[in-house]
């Protein structure tokens, strides 16, 4: 009997560890994502080089089309590289082009995006995707407005501005949806058309907020100007 | 024997109970002492934290007072001067102090609604001064109207300065900002009330109309590009149905009557996308689409994605456009698409499209800039040749073929420029050279981040 109990307990323990490990791994995989595509200028430089060396016959236009890909593959074959048409660090080095090791062009994490995603997650993780974009847009509209601080951190950490900052939920790790919503808002998406405020009509305590003109209600949040 | 045994058993049980009770009491005492000690420590910690917070608040108040005082002095010097260079130097200092003051005031525990006027005043003081510094580059000195405006701002600043001075005095006599700020009732506390009385002494905030940062005119934009008749709710719904294949369900999700008037719809598709679509009441154009994709599977190439994006844009009535910027984040590809007029790329009318690379579906769309800015522009002019413009590039920067664009500059200016892309030390820059005057108007730098590229 005791043995069975012990076995069951061990199994539960193992399962819990496994599940939490999977969750951590899952979190990790979508946070770390690097963009490896070449920029137009890099593609142009590469095309010029491949053209000079006789691999490429097309236009030096910065567009990585099929001709460029074919040229890259033949260059790779000639240089003993994996001929997959993908310009990775090895191919770049063989082309004599700078990879991102230069001191001035290190890949930096975008702190603005992360902070915005944290606030979106803390404030609106239960909302639909558009509801999350709208919250991010309000924060960015505040940055632009003369009535509010002029930086994303200034707006988010303004005392009493967001309940989730007051109670520490801002420190939770945002999920991929929150990142995506923050990214869209940074790219200019604003489904609220310039709103500066939002509130949850069932929990808002400030009477003052009701005096603002409502523009749109998304989920539990009323967005106002 | 049996009885004896029972006695022993009873005695044993009694003994056990006594021992158990003693252990329990001991444990309880230990726990209480432990808790008391722990509580004592945490109380002193709390008090430490409170002191630290109070210090941060007090420092911010001192900084605020100093920045306001500095700005007031620099402004009075500006008004008293008749020298362009001196005025420009003083105004630059006003800009700096306005920034510092804004930073300090927004770090104090004051609710937004009670101090919005003061924050706005400080921001606009900085914004107006920035604009004047720029104007001074082409003017001989500040004109009468500008001096008059600065005098009004100066008068308001003196009132704010006096009020803050009195408040600072109070704090120096032992008043605690933290103690007060915790007692928040109905969105106000006595700290807020005291500081916001700056508002009650009717500080005469001048209305600052200028084309620059934080100006009032910035919020009142006009939607210039929306044309057509008002459409009904069902017409708008038909527009949505025409644009998206595989709609499994479509629901009306309210309307907006703001600068833009829209009907909103939430749709779900058979391939499990949930999208939120806004359609303009005027003309029934799709304005925005919001959605996202969390799969990791890529089936569509970026080139195909671009084609889908361009088709979607043209299907929505935005013709003769080309993709000017693209970026891939995870499994979503972003395309910036700009209309072309007389071979000139119209950046102010930029449309943004996001494509899901797993299904090739449009999951993001933003045409609001297009509809705000798009008008028939007169873009014919005597433009310099591209090779001439290229000579305006700074030393050390080389560029291939440029392109001619309409660039939005400052706050209300649209200028036809040659755009040159150049790489230096692994960094990429975009240069904008005025196509008429050959003047270098702007430089953008591509900032590479782990989350894609941005232009600064």
Image (cartoon, helix red, strand yellow):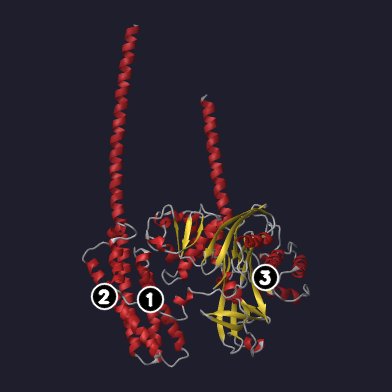
| Residue at mark 2: chain | B
- Name the residue rendered at 67%, 68% in the picture: A92
Q: Counting other residues with Cα less than 10 Å from the Cα at mark 2, is it few (<14), some (14-19), or many (20 or more)?
A: some
Q: Name the quadrant of the C terminus of chain B.
A: bottom right
Residue B380 position in % (x across, y down): 65, 87
Instruction: Decide which of tag 2 and tag 3 comes sooner along the chain.
Output: 2
Label 1: state its secondary structure: helix
Label 2 and label 3 in one chain: yes
Q: Name the quadrant of the N terminus of chain B.
A: top left
Label 3: state its secondary structure: loop
Q: Which residue is mark 3?
A: B317
User: Where residue B162 is drawn, which disc sits there?
Assistant: 2
Q: Counting other residues with Cα less than 10 Å from the Cα at mark 1, is it few (<14), some (14-19), or many (20 or more)?
A: many
Instruction: Decide which of tag 2 and tag 1 comes sooner along the chain.
Output: 1
User: Where residue B454 is drawn, which disc sits there?
Assistant: none
Which marked residue is nearer to the observer: mark 2 or mark 1?
Answer: 2
Q: Is B179 situated left or right of A56 in this image? A: left
Label 3 and label 1 in one chain: yes
- Front residue of this view, candidates B111 and A82: B111
Q: CA distance from mark 3 to mark 1?
A: 45 Å
Q: Which residue is mark 1?
A: B98
């Amino acid at each position: 009997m005791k043995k069975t109990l012990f076995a069951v307990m061990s199994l539960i323990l193992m399962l819990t560890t496994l599940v939490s490990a999977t969750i951590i791994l899952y979190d990790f995989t979508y946070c770390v994502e690097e963009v490896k595509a070449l920029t137009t200028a890099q593609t142009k430089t590469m095309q010029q080089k491949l053209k000079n060396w006789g691999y490429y016959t097309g236009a030096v236009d910065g567009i990585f089309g099929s001709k460029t890909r074919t040229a890259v593959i033949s260059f790779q074959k000639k240089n003993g590289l994996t001929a997959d048409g993908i310009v990775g660090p090895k191919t770049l080095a063989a082309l004599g082009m700078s990879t991102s090791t230069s001191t001035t062009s290190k890949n930096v994490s975008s702190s603005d995006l992360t902070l915005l995603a944290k606030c979106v997650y803390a404030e609106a993780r239960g909302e639909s995707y558009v509801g999350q974009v709208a919250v991010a847009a309000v924060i960015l509209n505040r940055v632009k407005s003369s009535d509010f601080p002029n930086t994303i951190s200034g707006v988010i950490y303004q005392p009493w501005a967001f309940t989730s900052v007051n109670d520490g939920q801002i420190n939770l790790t945002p999920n991929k949806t929150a990142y995506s919503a923050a990214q869209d808002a940074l790219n200019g998406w604003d489904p609220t058309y310039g709103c500066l405020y939002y509130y949850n009509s069932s929990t808002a305590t400030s009477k003052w907020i009701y005096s603002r003109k409502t523009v749109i209600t998304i989920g539990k949040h009323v967005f106002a100007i | 024997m049996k009885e004896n045994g029972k006695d022993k058993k009873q005695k044993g049980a009694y003994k056990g109970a006594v021992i158990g009770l003693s252990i329990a009491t001991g444990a309880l005492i230990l726990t209480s002492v432990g808790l008391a000690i722990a509580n004592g420590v945490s109380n002193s910690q709390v008090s430490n934290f409170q002191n630290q917070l109070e210090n941060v608040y007090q420092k911010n108040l001192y900084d605020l007072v100093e920045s306001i005082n500095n700005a007031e002095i620099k402004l009075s010097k500006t008004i008293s001067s008749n020298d362009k260079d001196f005025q420009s130097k003083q105004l630059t200092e006003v800009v700096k102090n306005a920034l510092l003051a804004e930073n300090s005031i927004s770090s104090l525990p004051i609710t937004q609604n009670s101090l919005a006027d003061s924050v706005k005043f400080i921001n606009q003081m900085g914004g107006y001064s920035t604009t004047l510094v720029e104007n001074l580059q082409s003017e001989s000195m500040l004109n009468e109207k500008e001096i008059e405006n600065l005098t009004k701002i100066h008068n308001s600043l003196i009132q704010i300065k006096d009020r803050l001075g009195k408040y600072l005095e109070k704090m120096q006599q032992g008043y605690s900002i933290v103690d007060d700020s915790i007692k928040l009732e109905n969105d106000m506390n006595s700290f807020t009330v005291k500081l916001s009385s700056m508002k009650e002494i009717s500080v005469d905030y001048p209305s600052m109309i200028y084309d620059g940062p934080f100006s009032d005119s910035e919020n009142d934009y006009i939607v210039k590009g929306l044309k057509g008749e008002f459409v009904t709710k069902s017409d708008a719904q038909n527009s949505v149905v025409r644009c998206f294949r595989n709609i499994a369900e479509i629901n009306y999700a309210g309307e907006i009557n703001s600068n833009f008037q829209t009907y909103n719809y939430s749709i779900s598709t058979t391939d499990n996308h949930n999208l939120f679509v806004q359609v303009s009441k005027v003309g029934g154009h799709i304005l925005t689409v919001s959605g996202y994709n969390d799969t990791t599977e890529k089936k569509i190439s970026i080139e195909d994605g671009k084609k889908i994006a361009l088709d979607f844009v043209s299907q929505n009535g935005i013709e003769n456009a080309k993709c000017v910027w693209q970026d891939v984040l995870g499994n979503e590809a972003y395309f910036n698409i700009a209309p072309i007029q007389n071979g000139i790329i119209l950046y102010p009318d930029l449309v943004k499209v996001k494509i899901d690379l797993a299904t090739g579906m449009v999951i993001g769309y933003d045409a609001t800039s297009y509809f705000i800015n798009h008008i028939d522009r007169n873009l014919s002019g005597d433009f310099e040749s591209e090779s001439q413009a290229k000579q305006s590039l700074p030393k050390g920067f080389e560029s291939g073929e440029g392109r001619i664009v309409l660039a939005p500059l400052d706050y209300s200016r649209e200028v036809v420029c040659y755009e040159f892309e150049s790489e230096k030390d692994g960094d990429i820059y975009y240069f904008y050279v005025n196509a008429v005057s050959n003047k270098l108007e702007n430089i953008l730098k591509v900032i590479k981040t782990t989350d894609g590229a941005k232009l600064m």
